Amino acid sequence: MKFPTLQASPPPPIDTPWADGTEGVTQCPILPGDTFRYKFVVDRAGTYLYHAHYGMQREAGLYGSIRVALPDGQAELFAYDYDRSIILNDWYHRSTYEQATRLSSIPFLWVGDPQSLLIQGKGRFDCRTPGIEANRCNDTNPECSRYVFTVVPGKTYRLRIGSLTALAALSFEIEGHNMTVVEADGHYVEPFVVNNLFIYSGETYSVLVTADQDPTRNYWVVSKMVGRDNKTPNGLGTFNYYPNHPSRSPPTDPPSGPRWNDVGPRVNQSLAIRSHPNYIHPVPQTSDRVIILLNTQNQINESVKWAINNISFTLPHTPYLISLKHNLLHTFDQTPPPDVINGYEDYNITNPPPYLSFTTSNSLYRLKFNTTVDIILQNANMKDPGYSETHPWHLHGHDFWVVGYGNGKFNVSEDPKNYNLVNPIMKNTVPVHPYGWTALRFVANNPGVWAFHCHIESHFYMGMGVVFEEGIEKVKKLPSSIMGCGDTKRFIKP
Ligand SMILES: O=C1O[C@H]([C@@H](O)CO)C(O)=C1O
């Protein structure tokens, strides 16, 4: 057996930008009854997620995880006996269409806290909750069992955990058991041990867990919503030591998990993640362009939107990939968004101007092919005072190096001096912590058009995203299967 080899750095372009699945960016929506075939090269082993990318459809259940195996003859860097995957999620009783309607209604109506947290699709809703309709409660339904993870005493499990929550940032733990983190978003990390793992929507981690505790009992598996004050009950499952009965409840109370507003441990986990020493993709030491993306929540009259550099993002009717490749430039706003807002130096992130002017636009950033780009995600106060949320930002078409995190406002001349340019982890989803900033670096070497957005369903819907174009002239002939909407009807033969 040999260990996997480090690939060219950064990973090579995948050459099928139309297989990204982002409605309005890389393709038209797939109509009811239609079939769409995604064809792409699986170029790196690891744990990944797939999901619908149309409106807020993901949270209705169109998602799953993908496990890419190492090529034959290669072994993982770490030893384990069994390999398992779980998806963590949150669950709302209102349909995604109802939620979307409420978010765009006047007055604005927020989606609120999820009603349950799901572990591998299983969760319960307490029948004693006042005002609950009988058909919504399921904790007395015998078919609604908890998620059970059965383990053999003494064995080590690789648990591939992915989060696809609509809203919730989560803390995940297995009562009485430490977890060793070994992989993040498909990249090997320098192993580190946690009692509870913080995981944000869009992220994946592999952890190793050894069943080395008292085998005569079962233990709790807990997922808990953090980062927002919430009333969502913790998700519960059972860590079942074989041969105990899987439905036997643990003799202890479930761990209550970290406090929702304890930001320190969450930032510490972000800071603890490093590339595995043998799998460091060398990071370019300088960048060609710096884009500072200021995240703000804006209220205009009775509607609430998120804006990036004062622009609340909307998707065009004609997907960018098609309009750029075929020069249909009238289909979206041609004024590029700014690399930094005017007056950024004087902007106070804890006390933003009470009325922030913002516009709604579908303009995009055009990047010079093969250049190195730094993105600074800057968090700020929400529209109400004293509150800043965590946002998991996800980039399509790339992995990026996470070169720094900081508290407060990013200092353009000082903070880059402290970037980690030695062993930063590469990821595709990363949190920006409350009142903090996160700095990313990537090489614009994947010809296509790529969304970059908050992975909270409602936030992207409310405008929290941007789009990057690079190397459009290098994109090959587009397949007709992605056409059919907006101004692309002209390419469909009757
Ligand atoms: O985007 C959001 O809107 C609400 C609230 O700020 C306005 O009702 C909330 O908690 C969000 O995350």
Image: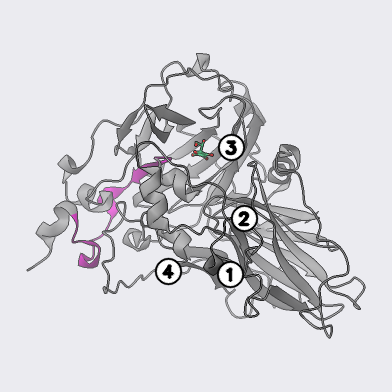
Q: Nearer the viewer, residue 158 or 122?
A: 122
Q: Secondary structure at mark 4?
A: loop
Asked whether 221 falls inside the magenta stretch, the response is: no
Alpha carbon distance from label 2 to label 4: 51 Å
Residue 442, how many percent across, how many down? 49, 44
Mark 3, residue position: 389
Q: Are marks 1 and 4 in contact (CB under 8 Å)?
A: no
Earlier along the polypeptide chain: callout 3 or callout 1? 1
Q: Is residue 206 left or right of residue 39?
A: right
Which label was assigned to residue 130? 2
- Disc 2 to disc 3, how far (Cα)? 29 Å
Inspect the image, locate mark 4, and give the three-letter code of the amino acid beneath it. Answer: Val
Left or right of 308 in this view: 208: right
* Magenta residues (range): 463-485
In this figure, which residue is indicated by the disc labeled 1?
Answer: 121
Hey, what amino acid is under mark 1? Gly
Front disc: 2 or 4: 2
Residue 465 in the figure: left or right of residue 477: right
